[in-house]
């Protein structure tokens, strides 16, 4: 979980491959209207995300053996909605500065629907998961192999891993 550009998809792919679990790429489940809004530089509202979060919850529930989900999960209510769909769900929070998020999102602008103008809305929506159960916060600027090892080690130490 985390703001745009933090590396959710890259880390998710690595962790899913290492664990032999399916990857659920959250961006693949946005409604066309939501993608159109983001392409136009219009931030999503809570109402835009409810159906998306419910579908992600259904995707998690369809994989009782486990799965890796990439999802911004910016607000506590979003994380709680996902937790309700999948008991024992954990979150790796990739923490990133606003400036680094803007840089990364701009660098991938040609290949992704999310525009740099939306980064500020991500930070405005972000509610820190600090203190929530089952959350590991990581510095998203660490190298991907290091992040992967940290997440895998954390999951191995969990009674639900």
Image (cartoon, helix red, strand yellow):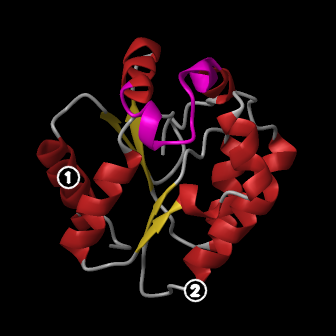
Residue pictured at 19% horizontal, 32% vertical: 142
**92 w.r.t. 105: above or below:** below
User: Is residue 112 on the magenta stretch?
Assistant: yes
| Spot occupied by residue 26 in the image (x, y as percentages of width and height) | 55, 59
Residue pictured at 51% horizontal, 51% vertical: 133
**120 w.r.t. 40: above or below:** above
Quick one: label 2, few (<14), some, or many (20+) residues within 10 Å?
few
Mark seen at residue 87: none
| Spot occupied by residue 160 in the image (x, y as percentages of width and height) | 38, 73
Residue, far front: 110
The quarter of the displayed image where residue 58 is located:
bottom right
The residue tagged with tag 1: helix, strand or loop?
A: helix
Q: In which quadrant of the rendered image does the C terminus lie?
A: bottom left
The residue tagged with tag 2: helix, strand or loop?
A: loop
| Spot occupied by residue 70 in the image (x, y as percentages of width and height) | 47, 56
Q: Are marks 2 and 1 in contact (CB under 8 Å)?
A: no
| Spot occupied by residue 19 in the image (x, y as percentages of width and height) | 24, 74
Q: Nearer the viewer, residue 64 or 87?
A: 64
Mark seen at residue 62: 2
| 2 sits left or right of 46 in the view | left
**75 w.r.t. 51: above or below:** above
Q: Which label's residue is closer to the chain start, 2 or 1?
A: 2
User: Is residue 123 on the magenta stretch?
Assistant: no
Q: CA distance from mark 2 to mark 1?
A: 24 Å
What residue is shown with label 1? 148
Quick one: label 1, few (<14), some, or many (20+) residues within 10 Å?
many
| 124 sits left or right of 33 in the view | left
Residue pictured at 15% horizontal, 36% vertical: 143
Residue pictured at 38% horizontal, 37% vertical: 94
Tell me which segment is drawn in magenta: 107-120
Q: Nearer the viewer, residue 100 or 126?
A: 100
């Amino acid at each position: 979980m985390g703001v745009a550009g933090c590396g959710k998809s890259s880390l998710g792919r690595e962790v899913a491959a290492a664990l032999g679990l399916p990857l659920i790429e959250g961006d693949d489940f946005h409604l066309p209207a939501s993608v159109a809004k983001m392409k136009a530089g219009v931030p999503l509202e809570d109402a835009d995300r409810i159906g998306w979060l419910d579908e992600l919850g259904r995707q998690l529930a369809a994989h009782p053996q486990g799965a890796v989900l990439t999802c911004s999960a910016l607000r506590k209510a979003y994380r709680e909605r996902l937790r309700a769909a999948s008991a024992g769900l954990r979150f790796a929070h990739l923490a990133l500065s606003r400036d680094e998020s803007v840089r990364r999102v701009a660098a991938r602008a040609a290949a992704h629907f999310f525009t740099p103008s939306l980064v500020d809305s991500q930070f405005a929506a972000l509610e820190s998961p600090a203190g929530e159960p089952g959350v590991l916060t990581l510095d998203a600027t660490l190298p991907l192999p290091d992040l992967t090892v940290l997440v895998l080690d954390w999951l191995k130490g969990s009674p639900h891993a």
